[in-house]
Amino acid sequence: MSNHPDLASVAGQFGVPFHVFPKAADTKLAQERLERELLLELEVDLVVLARYMQVVSDSFCEAFPQRIINIHHSFLPAFVGGKPYHQAYARGVKLIGATAHYATAVLDEGPIIEQDVVRASHRDAVEDLVRKGRDLEKVVLARAVRSHLDDRVLVYANKTVVFE
């Protein structure tokens, strides 16, 4: 399921059904309602927001409590919003991070499941930071999803305990 058709061919190669729900300001909530209905009909256990770049509504989060994982392209709470690697470059950071967390109605403030960092230096250009960050995002997201699917995540008070 996606809000754009870019990966339809990849899903097709694996025989995976692919549904597109394009979003615009005036259709966002209606499309989200259709997404929610399909996910509930299919009895989906986990929703992963990877490159989704949309804020999900309260009602969507309420339909899947602690069952929506978002990958954030920085070490939360730093560099929230768009172009985090550009922000990091401008600040001369020495670490690039990625954070996987449960989505809540408050953007990027859900309980954190997994985080990691990779070194950066003054020699790195913005493109290097983007590449390093995207590689790290994949690893962090995979670990968070595995922890969730293995029932190793306990959520309390907007925090998590992740058992090894």
Image: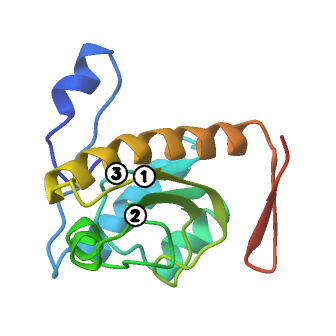
Q: Residues within 10 Å of mark 2 (few under 14, many from 20)?
A: some
Quarter of the view holding residue 32:
bottom left
SS of the residue under disc 2: loop
For the residues bearing labels 1 and 2, Cβ distance under 8 angstroms = yes
Residue, disc 2: 94
For the residues bearing labels 3 and 1, Cβ distance under 8 angstroms = no
Separation (CA) of disc 3 from disc 2: 12 Å
User: In the image, which is nearer the foreground, mark 3 or mark 2?
Assistant: 2
Q: Look at label 3 and name its amino acid.
A: Gly
Q: Look at label 1 and name its amino acid.
A: Arg
Residue 88, image x, y percentages = 30, 71
Marks 3 and 2, the one that precedes in the sequence: 2
Q: Look at label 2 and name its amino acid.
A: Lys
Residue 74, image x, y percentages = 41, 65
SS of the residue under disc 1: strand
Quarter of the view holding residue 53:
bottom left
Q: Which residue is drawn at 56% across and 58% down?
A: 68
Identify which residue, 19 or 117, lies in the foreground: 117
| Quadrant position of the N terminus in the picture | top left
Residue, disc 3: 133
Q: Residue 43 carries which label?
A: none
Q: In this view, does 8 lie to the left or right of 88?
A: left
| Quadrant position of the C terminus in the picture | top right
Q: Is residue 45 visible?
A: no
SS of the residue under disc 3: helix
Q: Residue at x 35, y 23 (%)?
A: 16
Q: Is residue 120 left or right of residue 86?
A: right
Separation (CA) of disc 1 from disc 2: 6 Å
* 13 versus 69 height, above or below: above
Q: How crowded is mark 1: few (under 14 residues within 10 Å), some or many (20 or more)?
A: few
Residue, disc 1: 119
